[in-house]
Image (cartoon, grey):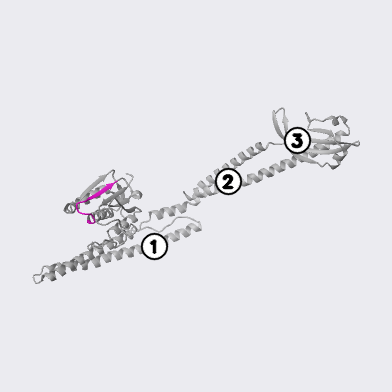
């Protein structure tokens, strides 16, 4: 949810609560004001009736409301002397409405020519349900008008105010370390956005400097380490061909060549992981996992035949992903080699490809492995002395670089590795 929409949501909820509480308070205040006004009117009507009784004796025979708004009944002196004016709400039947209607009634007592009387004066009340309904709809319309006003302000006024922020965000999203990116120069007079630009530019400079430093290191390390190792292996191979070597010396030299070869592979793997983590493989294009898998199955056909391993390849759909081509090949190659290398002879390997997943399963020589450790660097089977223990770690590093998930499971004596390419699957 966008920042503007989230702020609108919070404001809407806040306004709804505030207006709801205010409407309840407003309703009771209005109700009290209406009753005070009606009570004042009843007092005034009482005084007018008392004045009329002095000139019109027929009023004393008005013992029913009928068409009038008062009635008079004789009472004893004792009751009259202790009587106090009393205001009450009650219901009265109205012929025109054919229903009971709420009224406000004033009970009072007065004396006339040594006789005492009970006076009742009535006045119509606004029905509470009508008042509540009118108030409710008034509040709803007020709330809707407020929200509409805020929405307009959000989209027009605040939209322009926040435009520099979204421009900066867009530049951050498209920033590439391998490109010569210009500094942010978004026109704005807002202090916070200026500070954000300055912080972003500082981050660009530090990231670029660190990237160049790391790139130079890996390139130098690749050259400075691989060349001596290659020379060592070459010299040893030449020495191994010497006719003056005895059998024991030849075996020792062969063992050293094997160790140097493993050192070379280890160096290449560590440098590869460093390059991946430093984002030096930024060239992205659409690659077919199906096609890459078929190519490597062809490359390893002789090895699988030699180990008498049957490969079952299942394709449900084309899996096309947006990633670096070299890394996609390393990822699939490492998983296939891992399955072949650790598989039992005379057994099966199953590879299944769906639109978003790559799954490879093999019957290993060991039971279930620790899923928390299997992707760690140098985590390997102790019996596999030729392994560098970096194959699965490289796969994990590649998947992390593309926000893809690689997981391990063990079921029915099958070791399975699954990659979910959901975040980088091509829409084509």
Per the model, the C-alpha gap separating discs 2 and 3 is 36 Å
Q: Position of residue 287 (x, y in %)?
A: 28, 49
Q: Secondary structure at mark 3?
A: strand
Q: Position of residue 367 (x, y in %)?
A: 28, 56
Question: Which of the 4 image quarters holds residue 220?
Answer: bottom left
Comparing labels 2 and 3, the label whose residue is closer to the camera: 3
Q: Residue at x 47, y 49 (%)?
A: 2
Question: What is the crowding at mark 2: few (fewer than 14 residues within 10 Å), some, or many (at least 20)?
Answer: some
Q: Which residue is mark 3?
A: 123
Q: Is residue 371 left or right of residue 342?
A: right
* 349 is within the stretch colored magenta: yes
Work out which quarter of the rendered image holds the C terminus and state it: top left
Q: Residue at x 27, y 47 (%)?
A: 352
Q: Which residue is mark 1?
A: 205
Q: Which residue is mark 2?
A: 16
Q: Is residue 146 left or right of residue 421?
A: right
Q: Is residue 167 left or right of residue 9?
A: left
Image: magenta residue range:
341-353
Q: Residue at x 46, y 58 (%)?
A: 196
- Note whether 32 is above or below 97 in the view shown: below
Q: Position of residue 264 (x, y in %)?
A: 23, 64
Earlier-in-chain disc, 1 versus 2: 2
Question: Which of the 4 image quarters holds residue 120?
Answer: top right
Closer-to-camera residue (26/349): 349
Residue that lies at the very extreme toward the right in this rendered image: 113
* 89 is within the stretch colored magenta: no
Per the model, the C-alpha gap separating discs 1 and 2 is 47 Å
Earlier-in-chain disc, 1 versus 3: 3
Question: What is the crowding at mark 1: few (fewer than 14 residues within 10 Å), some, or many (at least 20)?
Answer: some
Comparing labels 1 and 3, the label whose residue is closer to the camera: 3
């Amino acid at each position: 949810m966008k920042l503007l929409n989230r702020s609108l949501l919070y404001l809407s909820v806040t306004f709804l609560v505030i207006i709801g509480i205010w409407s309840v308070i407003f309703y009771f205040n209005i109700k009290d004001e209406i009753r005070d006004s009606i009570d004042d009117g009843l007092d005034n009507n009482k005084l007018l009736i008392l004045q009329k009784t002095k000139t019109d004796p027929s009023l004393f025979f008005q013992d029913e409301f009928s068409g009038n708004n008062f009635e008079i009944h004789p009472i004893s002196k004792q009751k009259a002397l202790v009587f106090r004016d009393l205001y009450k709400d009650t219901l009265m039947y109205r012929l025109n409405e054919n229903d009971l209607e709420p009224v406000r009634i004033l009970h009072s007592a007065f004396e006339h020519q040594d006789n005492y009387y009970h006076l009742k004066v009535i006045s119509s009340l606004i029905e509470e349900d009508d008042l509540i309904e009118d108030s409710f709809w008034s509040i709803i319309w007020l709330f809707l008008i407020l929200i509409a006003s805020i929405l307009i302000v959000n989209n027009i006024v605040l939209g322009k105010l926040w435009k520099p922020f979204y421009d900066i965000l867009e530049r951050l999203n498209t920033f590439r370390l391998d490109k010569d990116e210009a500094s942010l120069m978004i026109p704005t007079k807002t202090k916070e956005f200026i500070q954000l630009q300055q912080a972003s530019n500082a981050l660009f400079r530090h990231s670029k400097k660190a990237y160049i430093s790391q790139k130079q290191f890996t390139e130098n390390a690749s050259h400075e380490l691989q060349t001596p190792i290659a020379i060592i292996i070459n010299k040893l191979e030449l020495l191994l061909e010497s006719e003056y070597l005895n059998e024991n010396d030849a075996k020792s030299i062969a063992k050293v060549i094997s160790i140097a070869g493993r050192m070379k592979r280890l160096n290449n793997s560590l440098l590869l992981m460093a390059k991946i983590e430093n984002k030096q493989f930024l060239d992205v294009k659409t690659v077919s996992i199906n096609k890459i898998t078929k190519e490597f199955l062809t490359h390893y056909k002789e090895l699988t035949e030699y180990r008498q391993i049957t490969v079952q390849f299942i394709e449900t759909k084309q899996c096309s992903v947006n990633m670096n081509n070299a890394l996609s090949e390393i990822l699939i190659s490492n998983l296939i080699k891992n399955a072949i290398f650790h598989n039992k002879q005379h057994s099966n390997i199953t590879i299944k490809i769906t639109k978003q997943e790559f799954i490879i399963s093999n019957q290993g020589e060991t039971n279930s492995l620790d899923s928390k450790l299997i992707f760690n660097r140098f985590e390997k089977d102790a019996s596999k002395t030729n392994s560098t223990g970096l194959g699965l770690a490289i796969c994990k590093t590649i998947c992390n670089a593309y926000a893809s998930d690689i997981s391990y499971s063990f079921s029915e004596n099958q070791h399975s590795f699954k990659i979910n390419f959901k975040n980088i699957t091509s829409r084509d």
